[in-house]
Image (cartoon, rainbow, N blue to C red):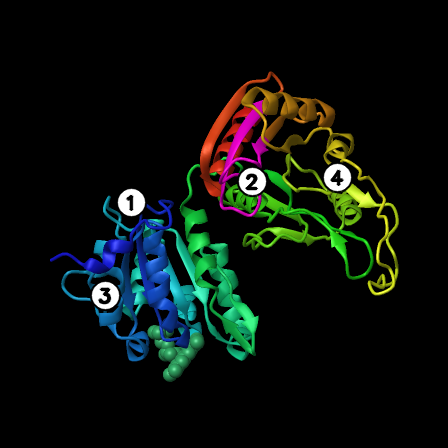
C-alpha cells in the first residue's frame, strides 16, 4: 500500500534526505504540534517514525501520526522489540531520536536511566547505541523551575543529549517552534562540520540614515543573503555573530544578534566585536549606506510650509575597509552589488573593491539581473579571489549560494 501522505517528502529541501528520525511523543499539550513537526521534517527529506507514550496517546490519536508520517506508529513494545529494531546497534538503526514534546516526567526518567514506556525504552537503547538525541522540553514554568528538573536537564546535557528550547512565555516553558526544532535536527546531522571551533562574524541587511525623526533614506536590502550565510555557518559548526541592520529576514536560531539601524551604529558594533574577540572569518554582506545626510534634523520637517528643500548627502565610511585594520588575521569576504554590467565588467569592479578592502574573497552580484539581489530568495554571484580566480554560481536559492561561498572560505582556510 502506498501512503499518499508521503508526497511532501523533500519539497522544502534535501538536508535530511536518507535520514531516519524517530519522533518520540510524550504527554504534553504541545503534542498537538506533532503532525506539523513530523511533516516539516519530511519536507526536508526525512523518513519519520513515531513512538508514543500512553499519556501522549490520550492527547493525540496514533492514527493521526500514522497519516502524518506514512509509517506505522509504535504505541507499545511487542515481541518485535521495536526499540531495538529502531535504535539497536545495527546498520538500519535511526540517525536521530527526537523527543518533542518532552514532559518533565520523561526527562526525569531519561536522566535516571528508567525505561518503562515505549519512549523511554527507545531513548535508553539509543543512548547505549550512540544515536544522537534531541530533546524539546514542554511544561509549565513552575515545573521547569523545579531544581530536580533542572538537574536532570544538566545531567542529560553532560552525557551529550542535545536540547532545543523551551520558550519561556505566558508562564510556561513552551516547546520550541517547529522551525527551530527542524533546524537543530539538520545541524546535528550535518556532516562535515568544517567550521567547528571557528568564530564567524556576518554583517547583514541595509543601514538607514535619518533625515529627521520620521524620515529616512535606506536601500532595498532584506538581509536574506546574510542570514542564509549565517545559518549555513551555524550548520557547519561555527559560533556566529550577526551585526544586523533593519532587514526583514529572520535571524538564524542560535546566533548572537547585534541589532543596529544606522551606518554609525553598525560601525560601532563592528569595532566593538572585532576589538572584543577573535573572529576567524568576517563576511561583510550588509548593504551599508553609501551616502548619509550632511545634517539630520532633530524635529519633524513641516511639509505644509516647507514645499521644497535641498538634502545634501556626504559619503558614508566604507565599513568593510576597517575590518583588516582592526583584525588583520580575520579571513575577509566582501560583497559588491553592481547594476547591469558585463561579466568582465562586474569581475573588474569586484576585484577593485577586493583590493581596496584588502579582502580575501569578494562576492559580486548584479542586482539588475532578473531573480538576483535584493528582496528575492535567489541570487546569481561571481566569487573572486586575490588571484582573480572566479567561481560563477548561477541563479540559485540564497541558501545554495551561501553553501558555495562557505565552501570557498573553508577551502581557502584549509590551505
Ligand atoms: C492535558 C494535559 C497536559 C499536560 N501537559 C504537560 C506538559 O506540557 N508537560 C509536562 O511535563 N506534563 C504535562 N502533563 C502531565 C503529563 O501528561 C504526565 O506527567 C504524564 O505522566 C506524562 O507521561 P509521559 O512522560 O510518559 O508522557 C499534562 C497532562 C495533561 C492531562
> Is mark 2 in CB contact (under 8 Å) with mark 1?
no
Where's residue 50, x and y in %? 28, 63
- The first of marks 2 and 1 along the sequence is 1
Q: Cβ of disc 2 within 8 Å of ligand 1?
A: no
Numbered circle sitting on residue 342: none
Residues packed near mark 3 inside 10 Å, few (<14), some (14 to 19) or many (20 plus):
some
Q: CA distance from mark 3 to mark 1?
A: 20 Å
Residue underneath mark 3: 67
Q: CA distance from mark 3 to mark 2?
A: 40 Å
Residue underneath mark 1: 18
**Secondary structure of the residue carrying numbered label 4:** loop
Q: Nearer the viewer, mark 2 or mark 1?
A: 2
> Is mark 4 in CB contact (under 8 Å) with mark 1?
no
Q: CA distance from mark 4 to mark 3?
A: 54 Å
Q: Nearer the viewer, mark 4 or mark 1?
A: 4
Q: Which residues are magenta?
A: 364-384
Q: Nearer the viewer, residue 359 or 200?
A: 359
Where's residue 260, x and y in %? 72, 52
Residue underneath mark 2: 373
Residue underneath mark 4: 290
Where's residue 40, x and y in %? 36, 58
- The first of marks 3 and 2 along the sequence is 3
Residues packed near mark 1 inside 10 Å, few (<14), some (14 to 19) or many (20 plus):
few
Is any atom of residue 209 visible in this view?
A: yes
Please tell me whether residue 65 is drawn above or below residue 405 in the rendered image. Answer: below
Question: Within the magenta stretch, is there residue 368?
Answer: yes
**Secondary structure of the residue carrying numbered label 3:** helix
- The first of marks 3 and 1 along the sequence is 1
Amino acid at each position: 500500500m502506498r501512503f499518499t501522505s508521503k508526497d511532501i517528502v523533500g519539497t522544502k529541501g534535501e538536508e535530511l534526505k536518507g535520514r531516519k528520525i524517530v519522533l518520540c511523543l510524550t504527554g504534553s499539550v504541545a503534542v498537538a504540534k506533532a503532525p506539523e513537526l513530523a511533516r516539516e521534517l519530511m519536507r526536508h527529506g526525512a523518513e519519520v517514525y513515531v513512538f508514543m507514550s500512553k499519556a501522549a496517546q490520550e492527547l493525540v490519536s496514533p492514527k493521526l501520526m500514522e497519516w502524518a508520517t506514512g509509517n506505522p506508529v509504535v504505541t507499545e513494545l511487542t515481541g518485535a522489540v521495536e526499540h531495538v529494531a529502531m535504535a539497536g546497534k545495527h546498520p538500519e538503526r535511526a540517525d536521530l531520536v527526537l523527543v518533542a514534546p518532552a514532559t518533565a516526567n520523561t526527562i526525569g526518567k531519561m536522566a535516571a536511566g528508567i525505561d518503562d514506556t515505549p519512549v523511554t525504552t527507545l531513548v535508553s537503547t539509543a543512548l547505549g547505541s550512540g544515536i544522537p538525541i534531541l530533546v524539546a522540553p514542554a511544561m509549565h514554568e513552575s515545573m521547569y523551575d523545579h531544581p530536580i528538573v533542572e538537574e536532570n536537564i544538566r545531567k542529560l546535557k553532560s552525557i551529550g543529549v542535545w536540547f532545543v528550547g523551551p520558550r519561556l512565555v505566558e508562564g510556561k516553558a513552551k516547546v520550541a517552534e517547529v522551525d527551530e526544532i527542524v533546524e537543530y535536527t539538520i545541524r546535528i546531522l550535518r556532516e562535515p562540520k568544517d567550521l567547528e571551533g571557528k568564530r564567524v562574524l556576518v554583517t547583514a541587511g541595509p543601514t538607514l540614515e535619518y533625515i529627521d525623526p520620521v524620515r529616512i533614506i535606506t536601500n532595498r536590502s532584506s538581509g536574506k543573503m546574510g542570514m542564509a550565510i549565517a545559518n549555513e555557518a551555524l550548520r557547519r559548526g561555527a559560533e556566529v555573530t550577526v551585526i544586523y541592520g533593519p532587514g526583514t529576514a529572520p535571524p538564524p536560531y542560535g546566533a548572537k544578534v547585534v541589532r543596529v539601524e544606522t551606518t554609525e551604529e553598525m560601525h560601532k558594533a563592528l569595532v566593538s566585536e572585532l576589538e572584543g574577540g577573535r573572529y576567524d572569518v568576517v563576511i561583510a554582506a550588509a548593504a551599508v549606506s553609501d551616502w548619509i545626510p550632511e545634517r539630520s534634523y532633530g524635529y519633524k520637517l513641516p511639509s505644509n510650509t516647507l514645499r521644497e528643500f535641498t538634502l545634501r548627502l556626504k559619503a558614508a565610511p566604507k565599513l568593510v575597509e576597517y575590518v583588516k585594520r582592526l583584525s588583520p588575521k580575520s579571513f575577509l569576504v566582501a560583497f559588491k552589488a553592481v547594476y547591469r554590467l558585463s561579466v568582465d565588467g562586474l569581475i573588474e569592479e569586484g576585484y577593485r573593491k577586493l583590493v581596496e578592502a584588502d579582502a580575501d574573497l569578494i562576492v559580486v552580484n548584479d542586482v539588475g539581473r532578473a531573480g538576483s539581489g535584493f528582496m528575492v530568495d535567489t541570487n546569481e554571484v561571481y566569487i573572486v579571489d586575490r588571484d582573480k580566480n572566479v567561481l560563477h554560481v548561477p541563479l540559485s536559492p540564497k541558501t545554495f549560494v551561501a553553501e558555495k561561498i562557505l565552501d570557498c572560505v573553508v577551502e581557502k582556510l584549509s590551505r
